[in-house]
Image: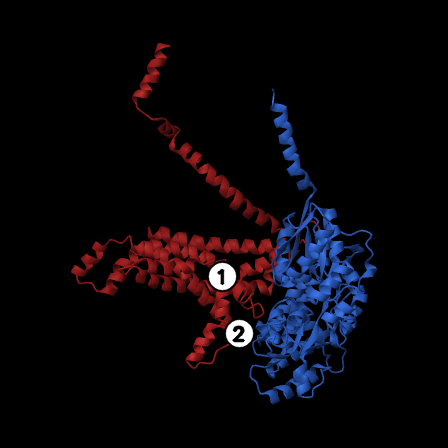
Chain colours: A red, B blue
Amino acid sequence: MTTQTIATSDRIEKAQPGWVKLLDMSDRALAVLLLTPAAVLLALIIVYPVLRLGYTSFFSLSLTSGLPAEFVGFENYQLMFTDPVFWETTWNTVLITLITVPGALIVGMALALLANLPFGVQWPVRLSLLIPWALPLSFAGLIFAWFFHSEYGVVNDVLARFGIQGVIWFNSPNLAFAAICLTIIWKTSSFMALIILAGLQTIPRSLYEAADVDGAGRIRQFLEITLPLLKPAIVVALIFRTITALQTFDIPYMMTGGGPGTSTSTLAMYIHQNTVSFLDLGYGSALAVVMFALSMCVTAVYLRIIRTKE
Amino acid sequence: MNIKPIVGALLSATVLGFSAPAFADTELKVYISSQHQPQVWRKVLDQFEAANPGTKVAIETGGNTSEAQAQYLNTIMSAKDSSLDVLILDVIRPAQFAAAGWTSPFTGKDMSVYLPAYAEANTVDGKVVALPAFADSMFLYYRKDLLEKHGVQPPKTWDELKAAVKKINGAENNPDLQGLSFQGKAIEGAVCTFLLPYWSQGKNLVDNGKLTFDKDAAVKSLKLWKSFVDEGVSKKNIAEVATDDTRKEFQAGNVVFAVNWSYAWAQSQSKDSAVAGKVGVTRLPAVTGGESATCLGGWEWGVSAYSKNQDAAKKLVEYLSSKDASKYMAANGSLLPTYASLYQDADVLKAAPWFADAKQVVETAKPRPVTPRYNEVSEVIRTTVNAVLAGVTTPEDGAAQIEARLRRILR
């Protein structure tokens, strides 16, 4: 009895409040405990659907056939490689990514540098940066579809005022593609700008002052101070932007519906068409697995870049 | 005095008082796409509610094109969602809905009361999948005033139409006046665009579920439409034009001839229409040496297989597809009736005099291919028509693509 009391009071003397005792269960156990809710949530809403997607991609499962699902191995994947629309939409997706990601980076960087200037009133600048980002993608697509309309659109109207003959934007694959890319750059560069602006504000002013003393010019300061210190912010922005670019759906869907023909259709639109319109869940899943793999590859490349820089 | 029993009795009386009607009330939800004049259907639903106390019907609108509507219903139905009881379905969908088991069949229903085309469209493998809401087919709308002014007869062939446009446009000299408006956007209407001249050459696309594609007829069809664009009969951006754009442009007085469904009539005669009283409707032109052909349209009422109110929903659908409802919608919404006798009905003809000649057109209208994979068939044809009209694909390549892709789907 006595020994026990002594032992207890001994522990109290170490003066640990109750919650700190949790730390006693070892760092590892605590980490597991705290991460469990998030892990369960992720498992339910990401891991399970992705696994299920991979599983379904090995089945012939079409709700229009009236037949039960049948295991077909890699047949859906074989079909994909001989499907010209798959290749066309994948190529379009890659092209959109290659054009709009650097495009949004350059425009976003310029916007961020502009917004970082010492304006007297900050909020109008911040607001105009936020609006394109806050606008739902499909709204942006619809608005720009009207902008580029050959008869009622503001773009052709402005061109006409400068004496330039307007064009039928959505009648030509190249012009339709250009209109879509311009819209995506407008829509996404504000996201880039917001992240880069946050990065800019972490750079201490003293560095620039020191550079001034040393006689470094503006361009030199940008290349030697701003860019290197912004690198982490830029890489994060690029990862997010590239992945969403690979999943481009809303803007071309609203602007051209993939037309003329299928010339501006993206892989995400083709997946949507196969699953939602054609109800071919097997083939749609196989396409989605390919898109998932594509996103993972790009992320892996970026992560490698970050690691080597560190 | 013990008041507990009294309070208890009062409480249970109150609960019963509120809950009894709530149990008797059946709430039905009807899906009507926004292009189908839900405000006019509402009046029919009001009549049903008045005749069936205890049943309330709410409308859910959505999807102003057949494709948008199909996508929405595909999502709802593949999730086995029970929130919709009654669905409006395009005439091309019953086969797909039957294959997926999404609608409840009507057993023992006598379909001979309807026009034969609709009895057939709603019967899949001997089962009545849905009941007809209204009939439809494509017609040629024309500006009666302009044709009379220039002494032109309504054209019987597409070549005559071209000549008529050149004569009228040459004399009017109005750059805003288009000769012919039709559907070139990659929408369901573009499938009919392709099929009209194709059928007019006496060719069929599908026979007994087998593809009977005639490549020469397909090339000729695509070339005809492209020639309208190239010769300035139709405007250059025809690949952007959807069904309701045709309706709006015609109604604004900017079009001489238009290919459209019957619904465009009511609005062309409305107060804010620039062409009220100046519109003629006739059957579509044929290719030279061919027969006039048109696309069978119309929409159907189905009962969701996942509805929890099967009996009430079926009762409502019976009412919506009744002769009374068909007459009301013909007179008030210019929707073609599904009952043969209504084409001679005085009230109907007062609202739309041209319905007198429309029955024959509907009766000879051809159905689009009946297959559960219709959505894929449709996508192949409409994107190709769109690409040809935009000048991205030649008519020859377009026809070859349609053939190759349809062979994969209808194998």
Instruction: Please provide percent x and percent y for residue A41.
Output: 50, 41
Q: Is residue B269 left or right of residue B337?
A: left
Closer to the observer: label 2 or label 1?
1
Residue at left 65%, top 32%? B13
Rounded to the nearest angstrom, the CA distance separating label 2 from label 1 is: 23 Å
Asked if the residues shown at circle 2 and circle 1 are in contact, with their CB atoms under 8 angstroms apart, the answer is no
Residue at left 61%, top 27%? B7
Instruction: Please provide percent x and percent y for residue B308.
Output: 69, 45
Q: Is residue A182 left or right of residue A224?
A: right
- How packed mark 1 is, by other alpha carbons closer than 10 Å (few <14, some 14-19, many 20 or more), is few
The three-letter code of the residue at mark 2 reads Ser
Q: Is residue A18 left or right of residue A77?
A: left
One can see residue A121 in this view: yes
One can see residue B296 in this view: no
Tell me the residue that label 2 is attached to. A172
Instruction: Please provide percent x and percent y for residue B320.
Output: 73, 57
Q: Nearer the viewer, residue B17 or B363?
A: B17
Q: Secondary structure at mark 2?
A: loop
The three-letter code of the residue at mark 1 reads Phe
- Up the image or down, B77 lies above or below B119; here it is above
- What is the chain letter for disc 1? A
Tell me the residue that label 1 is attached to. A139
Residue A14 placement: quadrant: top left
Instruction: Please provide percent x and percent y for residue B68.
Output: 61, 60
Residue B87 placement: quadrant: bottom right
Q: Quadrant of the C terminus of chain B?
A: bottom right
- What is the chain letter for disc 2? A
